[in-house]
Image (cartoon, rainbow, N blue to C red):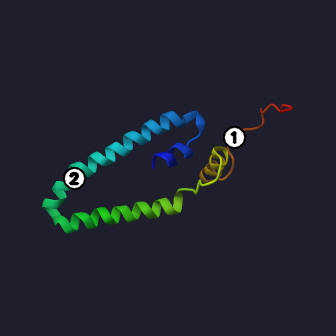
Amino acid sequence: FWLMISEIYPMEVRGTAMGVVTVVNWAGNLIVSLTFLRLIDGIGQTGTFWLYGVLSLLALVFCYRLVPETKGRSLEEIEADLRETAFGSDTVDRSHAVETDD
């Protein structure tokens, strides 16, 4: 989890994004902790684990369909792929780019 989220955000927002994702992760942990015993009392142990199991399967489908493969790719390639997927094309305005001899 931590490795993946450190790769999918552009460098200019990576620190802020990691902070937001960390808060969301801990909020999810808090929700599970607060609801677990209430669900056990309400729908029983079997129902509770089925509910969490179904939620886990939905998360697996989400990851399989929407999270890109990053193995063996540079951060720039990953960022370009995510920009293309999210916006239909590279959204960086290159009309004001300055070319160098490098």
- Residue drawn at x 59%, y 53% is 70
Residue 102 relative to residue 1: left or right: right
User: Who's the residue at 16% across and 55% down the image?
Assistant: 38
The residue under the point 43% across, 38% down is: 20
Which kind of residue does numbered mark 1 sit on?
Answer: Val
Of pointers 2 and 1, the one earlier in the residue sequence = 2
Quick check: 13 above or below 57? above
- Report which residue position mark 2 lands on: 35
Mark 2 residue crowding within 10 angstroms, few (<14) / some (14–19) / many (20+): few
Which quadrant does the C terminus fall into? top right
Residue 13 is situated, as x and y percent measured from the top left of the image, at: 55, 35
For the residue pair 43 and 22, the one nearer the viewer reads as 22
Q: Residue at position x 16%, y 60% from top?
A: 40
In-image side of 94 versus 15 (left or right): right
7 lies left or right of 43:
right
In front here: 88 or 40? 40
